[in-house]
Image (cartoon, grey):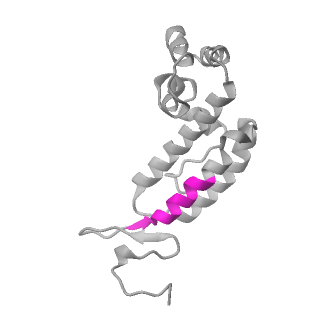
């Protein structure tokens, strides 16, 4: 009785999928599934874990690949693009926190090709890691191609 109901398709979910409103009904990922995905990625990239980026990737890549294989056939690709960029931001935050001190952060940014003034300003910034993960310095130092080279799958590409 708790699982059965008579309702519009937009108000129900089935096997992790739901349907959009509007004149053209499309298959979408259910909100509960998105919450579960984000919770799992947060567990993998959490702050207190203290492991290398390679160890994080060995745990994250199979999870994302499996998730993409199941949910990659949704008809709302904007959600997949958002989740991919969100995961990259989480990884930038993890790396930023691993560098710990402003001196190490500045050195790491300089080693990755960021201009000296931008690296100094970013390393000494009082802004939080999540804000800085979207800043220009970290986008230059840790571009999308860097995470692709580590093996991070793109949720938009269903193969």
Residue 69: x %, y % from top left: 58, 62
Residue at point 58%, 16% (across, down): 113
Say whether residue 36 is left or right of residue 57: left
Residue at point 75%, 35% (across, down): 52
Residue 87: x %, y % from top left: 55, 44
Q: Is residue 5 magenta?
A: no
Q: Determine the residue located farthest toward the bottom in the rendered image.
A: 1
* Front-most of residues 138 and 146: 138
Image quadrant containing the C terminus: bottom right
Residue at point 39%, 59% (across, down): 76
Query: Where is 35 relative to 14, above or below?
Result: above
Residue at point 63%, 60% (across, down): 66
Query: Where is 87 relative to 40, above or below?
Result: above
Q: Magenta part mainly helix, strand or loop?
A: helix
Q: Determine the residue located farthest toward the top in the rendered image.
A: 117
Residue 59 is at least partly visible in this image: yes
Query: Which residues, given as a range, are shown in magenta?
Result: 27-40
């Amino acid at each position: 009785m708790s699982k059965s109901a008579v309702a519009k398709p937009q108000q129900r979910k089935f096997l992790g999928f739901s349907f959009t409103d509007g004149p053209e009904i499309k298959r979408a990922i259910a909100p509960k599934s998105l919450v579960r995905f984000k919770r799992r990625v947060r567990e993998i990239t959490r702050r207190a874990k203290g492991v290398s980026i390679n160890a994080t990737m060995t745990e994250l890549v199979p999870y994302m690949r499996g998730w993409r294989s199941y949910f990659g056939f949704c008809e709302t690709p904007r959600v997949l693009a958002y989740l991919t960029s969100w995961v990259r931001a989480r990884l930038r935050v993890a790396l930023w926190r691993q560098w710990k001190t402003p001196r190490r952060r500045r050195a790491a940014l300089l080693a990755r090709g960021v201009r000296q003034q931008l690296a100094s300003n970013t390393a000494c910034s009082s802004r939080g890691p999540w804000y800085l993960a979207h800043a220009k310095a970290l986008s230059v130092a840790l571009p999308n191609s860097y995470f692709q080279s580590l093996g991070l799958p793109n949720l938009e590409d269903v193969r």
